[in-house]
Structures are given as structure tokens and as C-alpha cells.
Amino acid sequence: MIAGDLLAALPSPEAAISPLAEGAALLRAFAAEEAPALLEALNSVLAAAPFRHMLTPGGHRMSVAMSNCGRLGWVTDRRGYRYDDRDPETERPWPAMPSLFASVAARAAARSGYPAFAPDCCLINRYHPGARMALHQDRDERDFSQPIVSVSLGLPAIFLFGGLTREARPLRVRLAHGDVVVWGGRVRLAFHGVAPLANGLHPLTGSARINLTFRKAA
Ligand code: MD3
Ligand code: FE
């Protein structure tokens, strides 16, 4: 059972890398030093592809604002979830993935046992206080043997880490500024979500949490 593995291996405060479960690793503060440069590169991406609140297929406006960079972008609207090589707002290709983004993601993956991770998509999620993400699986990608790398910036969040069925009670893991998680192996298809963001102010992001989610979609 995945949740049991996670509990058994919860990070000790001094551990820089801790195995969360088979195939997954939590790299505390891995991107903390690069965070200012990541946020600066992010601003250029957002100038070309601003944050927007997408609609779910059921017609609900997501509380998380999103954008993308890289060859493909994850989008949702009334027609469904999919990857698209163009921003539906501008009908232009998504901004290129900044080289620092690709390098942080590849270094984190390599450290976690995935030496050749070459993401073609970076989904950018912005949470303000109250924003949340309901439990879901990431299954719009072609090859589930490819990991997902997530970089947390700004305000902390409680990440909900569930099992392989929706019924399993999720564990709560606090993700803070600079934390990087590599999700592969058995947990690649685990249900997961984010609890409503608490109020706060972060020196680099103000009242926001930013999550960069790197995937190889095609
Ligand atoms: C665990 N985003 O965009 S990233 C998403 O913090 C998403 O914004 C969350 O879930 C966020 O789809 C979490 C961490 C993450 C991503 C993919 C996973 C955790 C995962 C896939 C399997 C298990
Ligand atoms: Fe997800």
C-alpha cells in the first residue's frame, strides 16, 4: 500500500532526499537557490502566455490559474482535458521552456533515478489563498513510465497524496518554497490534490504559491 510506504519513509528533518514511496522522491529545498532566477524566467513566459482560469469539462472554473511553456501545454475546456501545441487564448505556440526550467527538472529527475528526463511540457499552476485542486490522477500523457517533476515556489501548501484508488484516504505532506518532488514508478498514477491554500505572504511571490509541473506528454 502506497500510503504505508510514505508514512514509513517520512523525511527526517535533516534528510535532503527522502524516498516518498517506490519510484518517488522528495527533494527538500532542491530549487531554493535557483528560485529567484526561476521566477524571473517565469515572468517572461507569463508575458507571452498569461495566467488564466480554465473551465473543466463539467463547466466549472478552476480556482487554480494556469499557463504553460514548452512544446505542449495542458489545457481543459468544455471539450475535455488534452495537450495542445498552441495556447487557445492566442492561437500561438506556447512560449519555449526556459533552459533553467529544463535543467532543474532534469537534475532533480536524475538524482531520483531517472537519468534521461526530457519534459516537453511545463504546466504552471498559481494558487492564491482558498485555491485548491481536487483529487485526480495525471493520465493524459502517453507514457506512464516517464516521471513527473514538480517544483513548489512561494507560499507552502498541503499536498494530498492518495492511493491508486479514489477511496484511499490521502496523506498530507507540506510542500514549501523550493521543494521538488519526483513522481514515478508505482505512484505515477496515484490520486493526488492540493488542500485549499492558507493565507500568507511570501517575499518572492506575495500571496501566491506557484507550482511548476514538468511532464513528458507525447
Ligand atoms: C503525484 N498539481 O497540475 S504537483 C497537476 O501542486 C497537479 O499544483 C499539483 O497535480 C500542484 O496535475 C501537484 C505534484 C504531482 C504531480 C503529478 C503527480 C504529484 C503527483 C502524479 C502522480 C502522483
Ligand atoms: Fe496532478
Image (cartoon, helix red, strand yellow):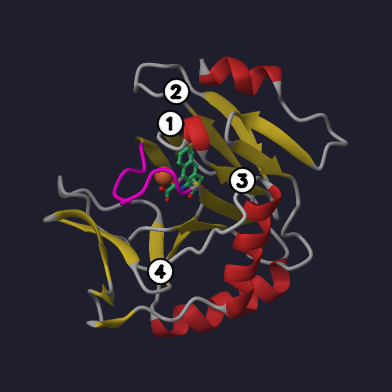
Residue designated by label 2: 163
Q: Ligand 1 near label 3 (Cβ, under 8 Å)?
A: yes
Depth order, front residue of 170/1 = 1
The percent position of residue 83, horizontal first and vertical second, equals 27, 62
Instruction: State which quadrant residue 113 falls in.
Output: top right
Magenta segment boundaries in residue numbering: 137-146
Q: Which mark is residue 119?
A: none
**Distance from the alpha carbon under mark 4 to that under mark 2:** 27 Å
For marks 3 and 4, give the one nearer the viewer.
3
Residue beneath the point at 48% across and 79% down: 45
Is the residue under label 4 in contact with that under label 1 (CB below 8 Å)? Answer: no
**Distance from the alpha carbon under mark 1 to that under mark 2:** 5 Å
Which SS class for mark 1? loop
Instruction: Tell me if residue 55 can be seen.
Output: yes
Q: Amino acid at mark 2?
A: Gly
Within 10 Å of disc 3 (Cα), the crowding (few <14, some 14-19, many 20+) is many
**Distance from the alpha carbon under mark 1 to that under mark 4:** 23 Å
From the image, give the main secondary structure of the stretch colored magenta.
Answer: loop
For marks 1 and 4, give the one nearer the viewer.
1
Q: Amino acid at mark 3?
A: Val
Is the residue under label 2 in contact with that under label 1 (CB below 8 Å)? Answer: yes
Residue designated by label 1: 190
Within 10 Å of disc 2 (Cα), the crowding (few <14, some 14-19, many 20+) is many
